[in-house]
């Protein structure tokens, strides 16, 4: 019996460590989406896009503005903020230095009623047609920012912004590149941890580890 308990303990320990490692490497869905975008561009022999935290934070602001505008039947968003909002609202909210605000050369929006991995969101929500793929494969893009948040009634909102700005000079954040901490969601390249975009995943992780601990406690008392 002791040998069986020892084997069970080893199995549960390995399983929990694997699960923890996975959760740590997948802590920011917005940054993961940047990797997926660049993999697609590389497959088309296009240059990789620089991950801009400032542009990512603005994308998150854009996504938050779209709260309540999700068409759950086809996972689309019809949301166009006034042009002035980018420099007068989004940039100050993020701590983007206004003199470095560059040109936004394209955007892609999407939403879903449940969380999907960046890979699934890429193909099932954001880039389902040639129109959106043409935006991604535009050769003038040099940098990208992704924002993602769980907002209205648990709906997940994605916003991807592209720019042709200088990779180290546009959309610069104040406070030595940290900018202003956001209260909701995730954005690519952030120096801060996600606030709620992967909250459900962390709750599942905690529940899973709790179950493992209970099983192990029962095993060693038998």
Image (cartoon, helix red, strand yellow):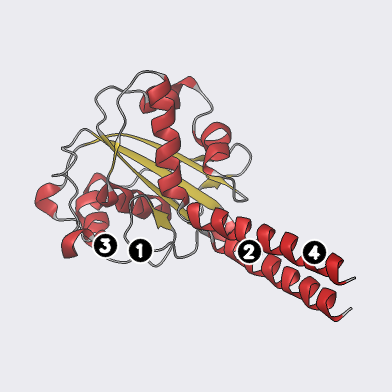
Query: Which residue corresponds to the image point at 38% horizontal and 41% vertical from the top-left?
Result: 160
Distance from Cα at disc 1 to Cα at disc 2: 20 Å
Q: Which residue is mark 3?
A: 93
> Disc 2 or disc 3, which is closer to the eye?
2
Q: Quadrant of the C terminus?
A: bottom right
Q: Which circle's residue, 4 or 2, is located before the other in the chain? A: 4
Q: Residues within 10 Å of mark 2 (few under 14, many from 20)?
A: some
Which numbered dot is residue 205?
Answer: 2
Q: Which residue is mark 1?
A: 192
The one nearer the camera, 53 or 208, is 208
Q: Which circle's residue, 1 or 3, is located before the other in the chain? A: 3
Q: Which circle's residue, 1 or 2, is located before the other in the chain? A: 1
Q: Which residue is mark 4?
A: 8
Instruction: Please give left or right for residue 114 compared with residue 162 in the image.
Output: right
User: Most extreme residue toward the left, as rendered?
Assistant: 99
Q: In the picture shown, does residue 192 fall above or below 53?
A: below
Say whether residue 83 is visible: yes
x, y percent for residue 162: 30, 36
Query: Which residue corresponds to the image point at 68% horizontal and 68% vertical from the top-left?
Result: 209
Distance from Cα at disc 1 to Cα at disc 3: 15 Å
């Amino acid at each position: 019996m002791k040998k069986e308990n020892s084997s069970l303990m080893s199995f549960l320990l390995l399983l929990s460590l694997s699960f923890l490692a996975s959760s740590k490497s997948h802590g920011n869905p917005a940054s993961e989406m940047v990797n997926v975008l660049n993999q697609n561009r590389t497959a088309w022999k296009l240059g990789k896009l620089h991950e801009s935290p400032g542009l990512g934070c603005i994308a998150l602001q854009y996504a938050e503005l779209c709260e309540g505008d999700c068409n759950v039947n086809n996972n689309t968003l019809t949301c166009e903020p006034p042009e002035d909002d980018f420099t007068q609202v989004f940039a100050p909210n993020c701590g983007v230095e206004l003199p470095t605000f560059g040109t936004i050369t394209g955007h892609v929006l999407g939403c879903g009623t449940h969380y999907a991995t960046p890979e699934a969101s890429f193909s099932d929500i954001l880039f389902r047609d040639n129109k959106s793929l043409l935006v991604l494969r535009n050769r003038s893009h040099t940098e990208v920012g992704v924002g993602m948040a769980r907002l209205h009634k648990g709906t997940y909102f994605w916003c991807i912004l592209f720019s042709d700005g200088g990779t180290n000079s546009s959309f610069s954040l104040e406070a030595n590149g940290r900018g202003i901490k956001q209260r909701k969601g995730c954005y690519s390249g952030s120096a801060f941890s996600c606030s709620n975009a992967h909250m459900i995943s962390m709750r599942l992780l905690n529940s899973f580890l709790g179950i493992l601990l209970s099983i192990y406690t029962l095993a060693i008392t038998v």
